Amino acid sequence: MRDVIIVGGGPAGLSAALILGRCRRRVLLIDAGHPRNAVTPRMHGFLGRDGRAPGDLRAEGRRELAAYDTVEVWDGRVVDAVRAPDGFQVVMDDQRRARGRRMILATGLRTDLPAIEGFSEYWGHGVHHCPYCDGYENRDRPLAVYGAGEAGQKAGMGLALELTAWSRDLTLCTDGPCDLGEPERERLARQGIRIEERTVARLEGEDGRFARVRLRDGDALECGALFFTTGPCIPSRLVERLGCDLSRKGTVPTGDYEETNVPGLYVAGDASRRVQLAIVAAAEGAMAAFAVNTELLREDTR
């Protein structure tokens, strides 16, 4: 029986494991090895590591954990997790099983890309969803924002307005007739944001990087980068399997120290907050670890 099982080996999970290892807790970190930012060449906004490859952070975190003999790391995927009378039990894809008194889910989220040719090819290479992560590198360039459908167009409008901090050459691509009302259109126009209502055929690039939006009528919109709005978050199936509440956006509502509605279960990282930055995920992992250790101390010293 471990003290804590951590599912997810990104910034949140690694940070939690490090803190708990320093508390001499028996920790099992399980990492499926499929990070959300795997396609991203550089990680930004992380103090001390700005511009580093995301994989470097993960590898460095693994090396640091190796110094703590109470921390064990398993590579593989958790296919099931259940609450048990004395904590939690997980089952791996290779049938390994483990039990822990507490659990931290740091599994992140999945990004579903629009079903348009070129999105997956240029994802992370000129196609982005977070201006805080990639806006600076594309400053003062012509930028496109993709937001289709009624909800997507409203979110796209918000993203386009947000991007005015980085560029004043912006086009909102609605991929069909724009459903925004006159007040919204006027607000965009005041900021010099154009609306492109023609249907998008595909995204095109040069030398492996996105370069233009090809429209169905053959015209092209040349861009330095394209930002798109993501739909509702798609959390790990373990979140629902363990009975976590979900917000309208698909994230898990958590308390001050990442606790959930499920006793003994904590969720840290992208799945618990709207601010989906690596440095925030690492901080949430540390806060969850602090809360878990405090809870176990109280239990052990009664």
Image: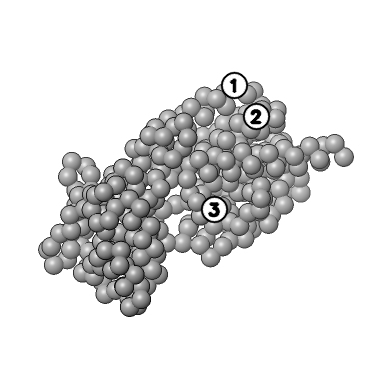
As shown in the figure, which amino acid type bears the numbered disc 3?
Arg
As shown in the figure, which amino acid type bears the numbered disc 2?
Gly
Q: Which mark is drawn over residue 67?
A: 1
The answer to whether residue 242 is visible is: no
Lower sequence index among marks 2 and 1: 2
User: What is the spatial separation of the Cα atoms under label 2 and label 3, in whole angstroms?
Assistant: 25 Å
As shown in the figure, which amino acid type bears the numbered disc 1?
Ala
Q: Quadrant of the C terminus?
A: top right
In percent of the image, x 44 and y 40: which residue is there?
45
Residue hosting label 2: 21
Q: Secondary structure at mark 3?
A: loop
Q: Which mark is drawn over residue 292?
A: none
Q: What x and y, as percent, mark residue 205? A: 19, 48
Q: Residue 98 or 26: which is nearer the viewer?
A: 26
- Locate residue 15: give its quadrant: top right
For disc 2, the neighbor class at 10 Å (few under 14, some 14 to 19, many from 20) is many
Lower sequence index among marks 3 and 1: 1
- Locate residue 300: give its quadrant: top right
Q: Residue furthest left?
A: 218
Lower sequence index among marks 2 and 3: 2
Relative to 157, residue 105 above or below: above
Residue hosting label 3: 273
Q: What x and y, as percent, mark residue 164? A: 33, 56
Q: Residue 153 or 82: which is nearer the viewer?
A: 153
Relative to 67, residue 77 above or below: below
- Is the Cβ of the residue at disc 2 closer than 8 Å to that at disc 1? yes
Q: Nearer the viewer, mark 3 or mark 1?
A: 3
